[in-house]
Image: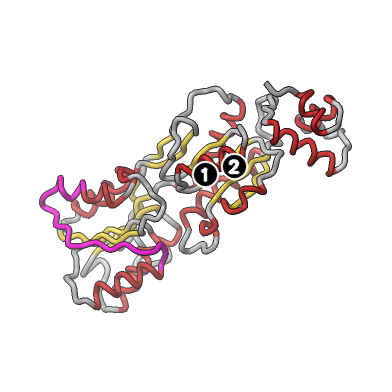
Amino acid sequence: MVTLNDVAKRAGVSKTTVSRMLNKDPSLSITTATKERIWLAVKELGYQHKRTCGAASGYQIAIIHKESHYQNQLDNALYFAIRYGMESMCHLEQITPAFIPFSMLKSLPGNLDGIIINGNFQEAQIKEILNTAKGIPAVVVGRSNPAPELLDWVTFDVRETVWTALDHLSGKGYKRILYVGGRDLEGTPMWQKKIYHYHTYIREHTHLLHIGEMEGDYGVQSGYRMMCGWLDARKEIPDAIFVSHDPIAAGVIQALSEYGIAVPENTAVIGVNGDSICRLTAPPLTSVSIHAEEMGREAVVTLTERICNRHAVTKKIMFHTTLALGQST
């Protein structure tokens, strides 16, 4: 087992200096270069520092995300909502977060207390994060977690999300349904895909008719292009359109409007996520909310609990979804 003495010897400082720095002693005065040597020694040796638990104040955490998550707020409203939840909880608990794209993983700071993995990463990517983190407590927030036996997981019920939307459409009397969604490029397990639960629902509710499906990029423009392509091909107009993400649904509604197809009078549209964009469409979009901000806040809480109790059994926190009625159905 690596000891405090080992870290001190590697960094070329006293054991007391290492202890005071790791415990964030405000009276300690050392140079930045010395701090960096200590953190490098901690990281290289894989030293596990047992700090006193209680208030989370003073923790420093990293939030690992994909580069695309924060490039366009309109198309990535889900991730911005999760981010807002994480930031607000960090502010409340006086935690310092650093947002680090996966491509910059090698620059992960050495003075971290914990890590939040935000998004749908493949198993190999999760392993790379954990290997780089060298034992730092970590939590996943998002739809999928390739390593639930290793990592706490804050997520939402994908099946419930899809079935809530289709229950609503069915209850309104819509029968002929079109599926429009984002193309999976992340190797997501089938049971975590919305399209899987969509087809399961259709099979079990024989009064509904699946008239087609389209999958493309994520975002407003992708939804617009897919819907225009469907209409240009003069395919039948569905009673209702199930859209896997709200920004795509916003593009679908825009295309329908330009082609003179009234929503919901001629065809209904329902989305998923409960994003802020729902209030910007005309008419306002009906969506199934996955409570993204709350998921972000819970991820921070779960991480602080994991920091204090590293040997506890890993847990999965599942958020239930709710229907957020707009005027598009």
Labels 2, 1: front one: 1
Residue at which label 2 appears = 89
Residue 208 shown in magenta:
yes
Check disc 1 and report its element: helix, strand or loop.
helix
Q: How crowded is mark 2: few (under 14 residues within 10 Å), some or many (20 or more)?
A: many
State the extent of the magenta-drawn residues as a range.
200-220
Instruction: Decide if residue 276 is on the left or right side of residue 253.
Output: right
Label ID, residue 296: 1
Check disc 2 and report its element: helix, strand or loop.
helix
Query: The disc labelled 2 sits on which kind of residue?
Result: Met
Q: Where, quadrant-wise, is the N terminus in this rendering?
A: top right
Image quadrant where residue 111 sits: top right
Residue 175: x and y, percent? 15, 58
In the image, 289 versus 213, the foreground residue is 213
Q: Do the CB atoms of the residues marked 2 and 1 lie less than 8 Å apart?
A: yes
Q: Which of marks 2 and 1 is nearer the N terminus?
A: 2
Instruction: Decide if residue 299 is on the left or right side of residue 327.
Output: right
Image quadrant where residue 45 sits: top right
